[in-house]
Image (tube, rainbow, N blue to C red):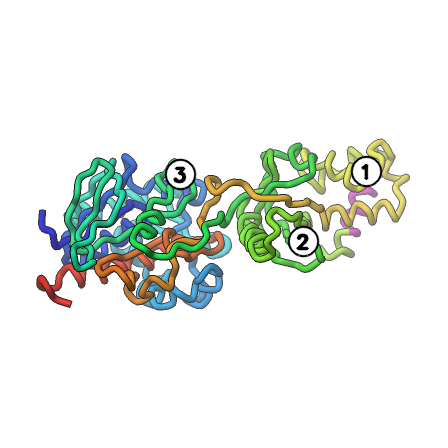
């Protein structure tokens, strides 16, 4: 094979995009994926539906939802933003999309596999050489310090003029994201910032949380507070109780605020407080009126049998205990003060957060190849000619809602085109 080619390392969102864009720009492309199939992590995003991007108002909104160095992607997002991403899939790859709550964009089929299949078909059309089951352990350099290819886990050397590292982060290692790109970058003398989990489930102290394992709550408001009573963040939407604590979209978004707090304070796993408002659509006065209506309807029933219209069945025993009202008390005996206790429980269910789940369970890795090492216009290494980075391996991360995938598409687009420009230069050209 021709040495003047792009080698893309990693068959995830950024790698697939880089391969397609590099090939479209006229360069020979070889994509190497160490797992036996492409897009393993893409297959499980969005609960297997793949939250492709976010139909935000503009690029600024995308950047605002990438608090981990989102400004670095300003140029890449201008080159290939969320609207272009949607056109790419719908018009060019013939994959119909739909927009759901929170401007989240999904394939109409609700199948993440269709996203991967559409990109695989495009690579086949472009004659991208795709090789699965091939791990890459190092980037090879020539005597001038320029990229000369890669070395595989089998010990073979594959020549190439440009290498795009798109190996993902350190989350979901079963999908192939085991930090290979970080090691390769460090071996080349590049700086890799501290790695930590982002968008990660949180561990709760209270035992009652375990009783609610599997319960999903929709349209709730969750706030995160530090030990001094400062609000760290607030989210509205869906959450999930688990055997260890809390998860679900809004908890995952707040987890970034929690991990940032622990990192900056230097007090790892210092207890933080989460308050859950189960009825955020109602003012306290409206909620009190609602409770009174229910109590009037079930006037002669016991308290434990009067909350069925207000709460999911599995949540009732927990709310009863937290409200500190005798479950066997008849509704007509409940005092105004006790009714106020119930209202406070419904609007401020308190959970003590004492840590987070391990990196392997996080959706996204925070940290990575230092953005100071990378040219934001091309995703090229500033120190190793011919080397490019794209996707989660770069120190950029954001909230749930399609923003992290958009970052991957944009970086892959820019890296693929820039690498093709280099490969298409005459030998010795600059």
Position above or below: 164 against 64: above
> Residue 173, labelled with which disc?
3
**CA separation, marks 3 and 1?**
52 Å
Range of residues picked out in magenta: 288-298
**Mark 3 or 1, nearer chain start:** 3
Q: Residue 62: horizontal and vertical position, in percent?
A: 44, 62
Which residue in the protein does label 2 denote?
Answer: 280
Q: Mark 2: few, some, or many residues within 10 Å (few <14, many ≥20)?
A: some
Residue furthest toward the front?
143
Which residue occupies 20% across, 38% down? 155
Front one among 185 and 411: 185
Give SS at disc 1. Answer: loop
Report which quarter residue 320 is drawn in: top right
For the point 59% across and 54% down, which residue is it?
Answer: 266
Residue at image point 34% right, 68% down: 75
Relative to 191, is 353 on the left or the right?
right
377 in relation to 225, above or below: below
Query: How far is disc 2 from disc 3 in space, using C-alphas?
Result: 37 Å
Q: Is residue 333 magenta?
A: no
Q: Secondary structure at mark 3?
A: helix
Provide the secondary structure element on which disc 2 rests.
loop
The residue where tag 1 is placed is 298
Residue contact between numbered discs 2 and 3, judged by CB atoms under 8 Å: no
Asked whether 226 or 316 is in front, the reply is 226
Q: CA distance from mark 2 to mark 1?
A: 24 Å
- Residue mark closest to the camera, 2 vs 1: 2
* Label whose residue precedes the other's in the sequence (2 or 3): 3
- Horizontally, is 165 left or right of 360 in the view? left
Q: Is residue 414 visible?
A: no
């Amino acid at each position: 094979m021709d040495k003047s080619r792009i080698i893309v390392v990693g068959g995830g969102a950024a790698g697939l995009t880089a391969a397609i864009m590099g090939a479209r720009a006229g360069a020979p492309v070889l994509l190497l994926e160490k797992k036996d199939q492409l897009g393993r992590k893409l297959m499980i995003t969005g609960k297997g539906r793949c939250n492709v991007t976010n139909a935000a108002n503009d690029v600024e909104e995308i950047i605002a939802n990438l608090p981990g160095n989102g400004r670095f992607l300003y140029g890449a997002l201008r080159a290939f933003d969320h609207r272009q991403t949607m056109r790419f899939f719908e018009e060019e790859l013939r994959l119909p999309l739909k927009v759901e709550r929170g401007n989240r964009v999904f394939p109409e089929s609700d199948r993440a596999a269709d996203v991967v299949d559409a990109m695989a078909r495009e690579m086949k059309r472009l004659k991208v050489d795709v090789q699965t089951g091939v791990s890459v352990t190092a980037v090879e350099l020539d005597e001038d310090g320029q990229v000369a290819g890669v070395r595989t886990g089998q010990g073979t050397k594959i020549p190439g003029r440009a290498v795009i590292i798109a190996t993902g982060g350190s989350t979901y290692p079963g999908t192939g994201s085991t930090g290979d790109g970080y090691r390769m970058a460090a071996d080349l003398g590049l700086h890799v910032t501290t790695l930590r989990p982002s968008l990660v489930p949180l561990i709760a102290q209270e035992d009652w949380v375990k009783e609610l394992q599997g319960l999903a709550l929709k349209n709730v408001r969750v706030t995160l507070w530090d030990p001094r009573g400062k609000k760290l963040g607030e989210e509205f939407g869906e959450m999930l109780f688990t055997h260890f604590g809390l998860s679900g979209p809004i908890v995952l978004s707040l987890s970034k605020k929690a991990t940032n707090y622990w990192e900056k304070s230097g007090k790892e796993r210092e207890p933080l407080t989460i308050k859950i408002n189960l009825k955020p659509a109602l003012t306290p006065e409206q909620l009190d009126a609602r409770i009174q209506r229910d109590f009037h309807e079930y006037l002669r029933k016991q308290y434990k049998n009067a909350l069925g219209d207000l709460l999911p069945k599995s949540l009732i025993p927990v709310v009863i205990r937290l409200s500190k009202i005798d479950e066997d008390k008849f509704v007509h005996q409940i005092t105004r003060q006790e009714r106020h206790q119930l209202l406070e429980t419904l609007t401020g269910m308190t959970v003590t957060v004492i840590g987070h789940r391990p990196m392997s369970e996080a959706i996204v890795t925070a940290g990575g190849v230092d953005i100071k090492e990378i040219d934001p216009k091309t995703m090229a290494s500033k120190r190793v000619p011919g080397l490019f980075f794209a996707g989660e391996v770069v120190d950029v991360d954001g909230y749930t809602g399609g923003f992290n995938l958009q970052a991957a598409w944009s970086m892959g687009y820019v890296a693929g085109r820039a690498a093709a420009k280099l490969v298409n230069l005459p030998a010795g050209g600059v």
